[in-house]
Image (tube, grey):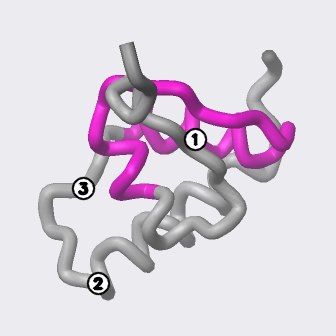
Amino acid sequence: MPVPKSASRWVEATQHRLMSKGCHTAPSAIDLIIAATAAHHGLVMLHDDNDFATIAEVAIDLDQRSVYDFPG
């Protein structure tokens, strides 16, 4: 999946919103780039990393699900 050219702007805006919310232990740059790519392409992030849930709190265009949310 190609990283969109707009990823850096998305990451910067998301980092700013996280900091404004008081999240000083921000997700890694790699997690943010992956999230930006998923949001750009309209994909659902299926993960076992709580950083993606944190990102989604401020990035309404990111659809994410934890693997722990599913039964079984």
* Residue at (65, 60) in percent of width and height: 10
Q: Position of residue 38 (x, y in %)?
A: 70, 36
Q: Is residue 15 above or below residue 27?
A: below
Please state if 20 lies on the left or on the right of 13 as rendered.
left
Q: Start and end of the magenta stretch?
A: 29-55
Q: Is residue 7 above or below residue 54?
A: above
The tag on residue 21 is 2
For label 1, the residue is 35
Residue type indicated by callout 3: Ala
* Residue at (35, 72) in percent of width and height: 18
Q: Position of residue 42 (x, y in %)?
A: 83, 43
Res 55 → quadrant: bottom left
Residue type indicated by callout 1: Ala
Res 25 → quadrant: bottom left
* Residue at (31, 44) in percent of width and height: 51
Figure quadrant of the C terminus: top left
For label 3, the residue is 26
